[in-house]
Amino acid sequence: MNTIFIYTPTWLEFGGGEKYILLLAEVLSNQPHVKVTLLLDEPGITESKLKNFSQTDLKNIKCINIGNTNELKVITANADIFICLSNYKKITSSARIHVQLLQIPYGKINGLSILAKFISGKLKEGLKDLFRLRLLSFSRDSADLVIANSEFVNNTLQKYYGINSQTLYPPIQDYYVQGSSKKKIIISVGRFFSGLYNEKRYDILTEAFRMEFYAELKDWEYHIIGNAKNDLKTKMILSLLKEKNKTYPIYFHVNANHDTLKRIYNEAAIFWHGAGYGVDENIHPENVEHFGMTTVEAMSAKCIPVVINKGGQCESVSTGINGFLWNTIEELISYSVDIAQKKIPLSYLRDNARKRYSDFNITKFQVSVIELFSPLLN
């Protein structure tokens, strides 16, 4: 029997990374002679919440609540494999094999960059960079397997830190409903937050809708779906967005359930994504989209993506084939208006978007997981 323990300190984010490792856990748990355990360190995280969030089958997976990471070495004393997804902390265990999941394409961190943050008053981020360097060094020198979630992340980690990672694209669930009809709706999906990594830039996108798109096409709606923490900063972000857009057909679906997400994916004709707007990805690759799971989710429902031409988005979307990559707000609006006014072959784009999604579906993910992990399993 192969015993596998999986842990991340970010369960409460309920984002793409958490969905990624839950589906990874499901695939591994369905292999013969494999026992998978999820380690949970937040009292608000339950098996039921995880299942509802990710739509995964956890029947073969055990969940254990731990107080803190100090317990990991005891709990994993006889484990074969420890899988960890961490953004900046080096987290170790007593397992025989360490698999590190890295999903942040860190830009160049060194003594000078850290000193610059200290001088500019960004003490917390400077300290975090010290931890990040430890994590990256450990991943390069000590991890038995490092997994990145896109070629963009993979190439960035190799370029700056010499980490030889393997790419395992996220498993994208199929949201398509046969016979559904498109409406005059634009959709964006992603967490509501403001932070170091790939902010979704709803401020820019809602402004583009208000000032440009809606000015020309007043019978369209813009729907934004995303999870949000119940903290003061997030509440302020949401409050400001709602206030600025209250007289426009812009709708915020906060912490919406799976059925709502699926319904609007199938109703929406256009998908917008703007993470990384105004960012030089050669200097700050961490601030652009690392892969873009929601983009491909939308494509599964034949929603045409109009997404920023940065980061991992370029690995799923090809302009004029299955969607459009934009560099400026003018391009975002131009492509979207052409779709709305049917100036381009919509059926061709929608069918190709659906076809491209199939390259990232759960079946492909299962095959890739087995290829990666088979050499590690007894």
Image: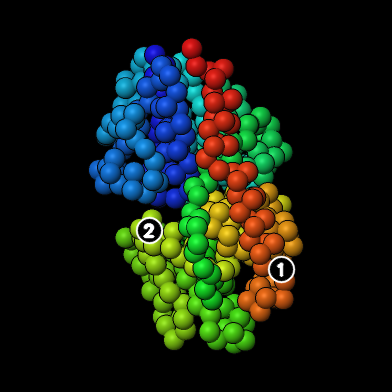
Callout 1: few (<14), some (14-19), or many (20+) C-alpha neighbours within 10 Å? Answer: few
Residue shown at the point (63%, 31%) measured from the top left: 165
The residue closer to the viewer here, 270 or 109, is 270
Residue shown at the point (43%, 19%) measured from the top left: 32
Q: Is residue 285 in view? A: no
Question: Residue 235's image quarter?
Answer: bottom left
Residue 293 lies left or right of residue 331; in this view the side is left
Q: Are marks 2 and 1 in contact (CB under 8 Å)?
A: no
Q: Tell me the SS state at disc 1.
A: loop
Q: Earlier in the sequence, mark 2 or mark 1?
A: 2
> Which callout, 2 or 1, points to the residue nearer the camera?
1
Residue positioned most to the right = 320
Q: Which mark is residue 355?
A: none
The three-letter code of the residue at mark 1 reads Pro
Question: Which percent across, then down, holds residue 204?
Answer: 57, 72
Where, quadrant-wise, is the N terminus in this rendering? top left
Q: Which mark is residue 345?
A: 1
Task: Answer above or below: position of 256 versus 252.
Answer: above
Residue 215 lies left or right of residue 330; in this view the side is left
Residue shown at the point (46%, 65%) measured from the top left: 264
Q: Tell me the SS state at disc 2.
A: helix
Q: Which residue is mark 2?
A: 259
Task: Answer above or below: position of 187 versus 354.
Answer: below
Question: Residue 137's image quarter?
Answer: top right
Numbered label tally:
2
Residue 98 lies left or right of residue 333; in this view the side is left
The residue closer to the viewer here, 180 or 239, is 180
Question: Which percent across, then down, holds residue 238?
Answer: 40, 70
The three-letter code of the residue at mark 2 reads Asp
Measure how far apart labels 2 and 1 are at the Cα level: 29 Å
Callout 2: few (<14), some (14-19), or many (20+) C-alpha neighbours within 10 Å? Answer: few
The residue closer to the viewer here, 365 or 196, is 365
